[in-house]
Image: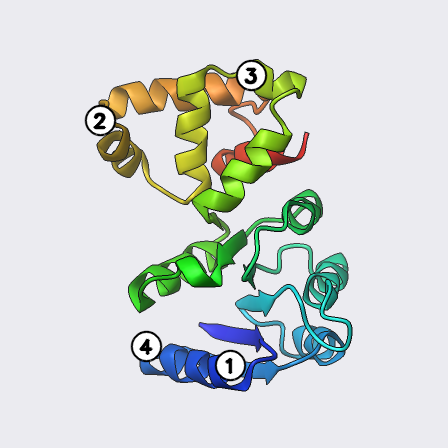
Amino acid sequence: MRIALAEDHFLLRDGLIRLLGAYGHEVVAAVDNGTELLDALIKEQPDVAVVDVRLPPTFTDEGLRAVLAARERMPDLPVLLLSQYVEPLYARELLSSGGRGVGYMLKDRVTNGTQFLDSIRRVAEGGTAMDPEVISQLLVRKERDEAVGSLSGREREVLEWVAQGRSNAGIAQGLFISEKAVAKHISNIFTKLGLLPGDADNRRVLAVLAYLDQ
């Protein structure tokens, strides 16, 4: 894959470049600020952008702002946010921007290269890769929402696993239920969130977006 990287810490940025290169990926841009990131995304149009939320000069939301601006021109640009913190507002802004291929991972919870690279791959393919801690905080903020309230407890559990990019088989294994039961729960989720079988886009991705941003 062709990857654009935005990380202000030199050692982490250099380590990510080496890690991605070791697995055969090409880092087409590696920058440390939002302005250069936006320019690189527009110029290179990478397969996926891996971006720290907080970049110089203010270390608030420069990374997020850059990817949101880029997605106005390239709506389907896949973006994986990296942060040291759970920042629900930033996650919701990215999710509500539309398009496919979104992720939000916490740096301290990335425990191995395989996990990290798998998250990048899922996002690049148009899926989601949300850290469970981020999902948990987003869901807590949405408990009073009517759409959230229409889902059963088990359906919420299944959708959390969907947001992590798990297959039906993976969800079944993780929740100790049958794949048939998982498929039934997902069908119910689609119905309650108004996602019809004829929708052209990936309904699993749309379900996650709808659930986290209604």
Contact check, label 4 and label 2, Cβ < 8 Å:
no
Q: Callout 3: helix, strand or loop?
A: helix
Camera-nearest residue between 65 and 124:
65
Q: Residue at x 48, y 35 (%)?
A: 204
Mark 4 or mark 2, whichever is nearer to me: 2
Whole-percent x, y for residue 165 in the image: 40, 45
* Cα gap from disc 2 to disc 1, whole angstroms: 39 Å
Q: Residues within 10 Å of mark 4 (few under 14, many from 20)?
A: few
Q: Residue at x 68, y 55 (%)?
A: 75
Q: Quadrant of the C terminus?
A: top right
Q: Callout 1: helix, strand or loop?
A: helix
Residue at the spot of label 2: 176
Give the quadrant of residue 60: bottom right
Residue at the spot of label 3: 192
* Cα gap from disc 4 to disc 1, whole angstroms: 16 Å
Q: Callout 2: helix, strand or loop?
A: loop
Query: Which callout, 4 or 3, points at the residue further toward the start of the chain?
Result: 4
Give the quadrant of residue 114: bottom left
Whole-percent x, y for residue 148 in the image: 59, 21
Contact check, label 4 and label 3, Cβ < 8 Å:
no
Residue at the spot of label 4: 23
Q: Is residue 104 above or below residue 52?
A: above
Type of amino acid at the residue the image marks with label 2: Phe
Mark 2 or mark 3, whichever is nearer to me: 2
Type of amino acid at the residue the image marks with label 3: Lys
* Cα gap from disc 4 to disc 2, whole angstroms: 33 Å
Query: Which callout, 4 or 2, points at the residue further toward the start of the chain?
Result: 4
Type of amino acid at the residue the image marks with label 1: Arg
Q: Is residue 22 left or right of residue 130?
A: left
Mark 4 or mark 1, whichever is nearer to me: 1
